[in-house]
Amino acid sequence: MPLLEVKDLKVHYPIRGGILNRVQRYVKAVDGVSFTMEPGETLGLIGESGCGKTTTGKAILGLCHITSGQIVFDGEDITKQVKKNRSPYRKSVQMIFQDVFSSLNPRKRVMDIIAEPIRNFENLTPLEEKKRVEELLGIVGMSPTVATKYPFEFSGGQRQRIGLARAIALKPRLIVADEPVSALDLSIQAQVLNYLVDIQEELGLAYLFISHDLGVVKYMCKNLAIMHNSRFVEFGTSEHIYENPAHIYTKRLIAAIPDVDPTKRDENSQRRNAINDEYTNQRDKYYKEDGSVYDLKQLSEKHFVALP
């Protein structure tokens, strides 16, 4: 049984205007997204800024209004429960936020930040709570002594590890990781990613890994969903998409990955120019007249692409 099923998810924001403040039109942040996730799976959600990937994650967590669609978690339709603060679903699905500086309350000590979800869902004694927080800090490679400190006393990588400890405090089954390393330098990125992998193996977590960095995603994810203009343009295994991209948007993303080999500079430049020419001359093959994306069609057992 799939852990998570998202069916035709839509998140539309009304734009109002005029004297009577009536709805003039809608911004379609997410416009018909469907996918499934298995227990322990890492699904990469890739796309440029503004494509709707973060809104998709927030909708799954109940952090924004769902216009239509269905969310099924562990075989149960939780679409109407997703915004209830004390529902079992809220305990089973947690989030790691992109901004490591604003996602931690600067007025709270680390102890209170990590213990907050525990206090919301469990009834532990102060001693049990302290022991749990120290265990969580140990899992993310931090000393128990940091529990009495404030967020401003830590680097970006340390703050993200505190956020990770908070996310796993309730032993969730799914974590939505919204660009968890994009604000960190490369050495710290590798450290945080390794912690994510180790914790996934230890706790059996599933990750919805939202990112625009294809290098990071290739390391983390077995399956990928490429998103553009509020819809999926390609969906499949990492192997299929990296080795045989079928949509022009996916080809452009992969072509943009830097290559450190200077001997391939001319070859890469020619390939990028050819892909840009294809995008310019054959755009109608991949997008409708209004610029929207076609429905996904199956190319193989594990590879889908948006084509007419």
Image: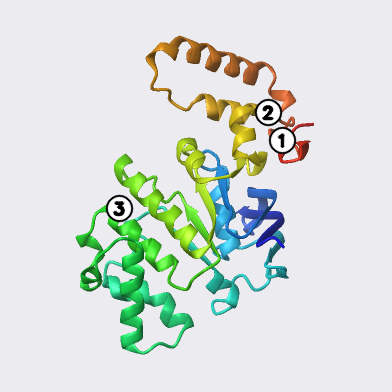
Q: Nearer the viewer, residue 268 or 193?
A: 193
Name the residue located 59 percent from the left edge and 18 percent from the top edge.
Answer: 275
Q: Secondary structure at mark 1?
A: strand
Three-letter amino acid code of the residue under disc 1: Val
Three-letter amino acid code of the residue under disc 3: Gly
Q: Which residue is denoted by mark 2 in the rendering?
A: 246
Neighbourhood count class around disc 2 (C-alpha, 10 Å): few under 14, some 14–19, many 20 upward: many
Three-letter amino acid code of the residue under disc 2: Ala
Q: Which residue is denoted by mark 3 in the rendering?
A: 157
Give the mark nearest the N terminus, 3 or 1.
Answer: 3
Residue 67's disc is none
Name the residue located 29 percent from the left edge and 74 percent from the top edge.
Answer: 111
The Cα–Cα distance between marks 2 and 3, rounded to whole angstroms, is 36 Å
Q: Which residue is denoted by mark 1 in the rendering?
A: 305
* Residue 278 visible, this orientation: yes
Give the mark nearest the N terminus, 2 or 3.
Answer: 3
Name the residue located 73 percent from the left edge and 24 percent from the top edge.
Answer: 284
Left or right: residue 278 compared with residue 176? right
